[in-house]
Image: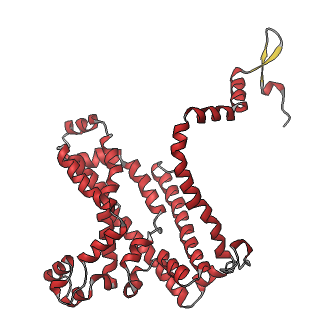
């Protein structure tokens, strides 16, 4: 379609001429001097951008530069030549992992299943706990008592993974006799939940107990710190909402159900989407420190599988392919969860 002057200009009947729309003149000026405005803003707030620089460097060196090594899952692995000079191998590593039909393929599918199960159990049992903690903190009237309880629940998050796994190992450690076992092992044995033989052999050496120990230690470590977001959303609720519910005869449980939870629903949905996005991103450090060859059947995850074959087995192409598949599945989960949330509740990340 051919453009006309009347599409961009305003006709002045008094003079019989065309003049430019003032609003369009402002928009043109903004577009023309856009980078000048950006430069002035950076100069004005240069201190904030200097504080932002370390984070940008971290993302640059630890997030974007390592992406170059992802080419290794499509190239023939050669320690002598750099990735750019290696021969293209296509999807051979992916085919071997998915449909190889050998022990390596079986180990990968086992690791993928364990990764999903550990993350799914963490989502089912670990995700609601911070919300419940935030609700309990909101009902504590004494500021001193609330502060003490919050600090006690936050502390495990600030301990290193090595310290956390060492404490867990000591609590469930094995012993020559039951009395030398960890406190939790002794308690479970005396209550009759496990036999003395299982306690003496060590719970971490039994594949059936690994997932439970991993989830309980994860809840202990993350629940208190994760409740900060929900507690901040709760204290932002207007007191008039509680007063209106009390006038209608609502008790504490009814206020939680009809006032608090609906008000923090958007926060819950956003946190759920981000949690689903990291469903297959289990930090291998904790698993690596807790598992052993006896518990590979339930403890081996994709990250430890890649670490074992990439560093110990010198099969970097297979390890990179395994991690890439894990990340692709995680990306698809984020997109799917965000789409479902947007259609169901009109709340989404994007």
Q: Name the foreground residue: 177 vs 268.
A: 177
**Closest to the observer: 261 or 96?**
96
* Residue 251 in view, yes or no: no
- Relative to 346, residue 209 above or below: below
* Residue 11 drawn above or below residue 276: above
Whole-percent x, y for residue 175 in the image: 22, 86
- Percent position (x, y) of residue 5? 83, 25
Residue placed at 24% from the left, 45% from the top?
255
**Against 213, is 51 above or below?**
above
Q: Is residue 314 left or right of residue 110?
A: right
Which of the 4 image quarters holds residue 187? bottom left
- Can you see residue 149? yes
Task: Measuring from the top left, give residue 167's x and y in whole percent.
Answer: 27, 72
Q: Residue furthest right?
A: 2
Q: Is residue 105 left or right of residue 242?
A: right
Q: Nearer the viewer, residue 129 or 190?
A: 190
Q: Quadrant of residue 120?
A: bottom left
Q: Residue at x 33, y 40 (%)?
A: 236
Q: Nearer the viewer, residue 329 or 217?
A: 217
User: In the rendered image, which quarter contains the N terminus?
Assistant: top right
Drawn side of residue 7 relative to residue 106, left or right: right
Q: Quadrant of residue 259?
A: top left
Residue at 53% in and 79% down: 311
Residue 168: percent from left, percent from top: 28, 73
């Amino acid at each position: 379609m051919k453009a006309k002057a009347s599409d961009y200009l305003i006709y002045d009947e008094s003079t019989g001429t065309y003049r430019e729309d003032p609003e369009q003149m402002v928009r043109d000026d903004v577009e023309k001097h856009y980078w000048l405005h950006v430069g002035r803003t950076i100069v004005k707030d240069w201190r904030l951008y200097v504080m932002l620089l370390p984070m940008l460097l971290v993302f640059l060196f630890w997030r974007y530069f390592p992406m170059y090594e992802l080419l290794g899952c499509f190239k023939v692995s050669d320690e002598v030549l750099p990735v750019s000079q290696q021969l293209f191998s296509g999807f051979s590593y992916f085919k071997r992992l998915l449909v190889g039909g050998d022990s390596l393929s079986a180990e990968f599918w086992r690791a993928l299943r364990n990764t999903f199960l550990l993350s799914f159990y963490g989502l089912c049992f670990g995700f609601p706990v911070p919300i419940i903690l935030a609700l309990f903190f909101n009902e504590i009237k004494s500021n001193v008592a609330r502060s003490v309880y919050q600090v006690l629940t936050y502390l495990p998050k600030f301990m290193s993974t090595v310290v956390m796994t060492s404490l867990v190992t000591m609590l469930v450690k094995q012993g020559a006799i039951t009395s030398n076992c960890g406190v939790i092992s002794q308690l479970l044995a005396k209550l009759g939940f496990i036999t003395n033989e299982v306690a003496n052999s060590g719970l971490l050496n039994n594949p059936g107990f690994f997932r439970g120990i991993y989830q309980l230690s994860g809840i202990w470590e993350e629940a208190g710190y994760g409740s900060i977001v929900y507690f901040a959303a709760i204290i932002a609720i207007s007191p008039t909402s509680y007063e209106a519910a009390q006038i209608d005869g609502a008790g504490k449980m009814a206020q939680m159900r009809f006032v608090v939870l609906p008000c923090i629903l958007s926060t819950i949905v956003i946190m759920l989407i981000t949690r689903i996005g990291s469903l297959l991103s289990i930090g291998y450090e904790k698993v690596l420190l807790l598992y052993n060859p006896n518990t590979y059947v339930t403890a081996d995850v994709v990250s430890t599988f890649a670490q074992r074959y990439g560093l110990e087995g010198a099969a970097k192409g297979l390890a990179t392919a395994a991690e890439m598949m894990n990340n692709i599945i995680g990306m698809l989960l984020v997109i799917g969860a965000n789409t479902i949330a947007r259609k169901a509740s009109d709340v989404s990340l994007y």
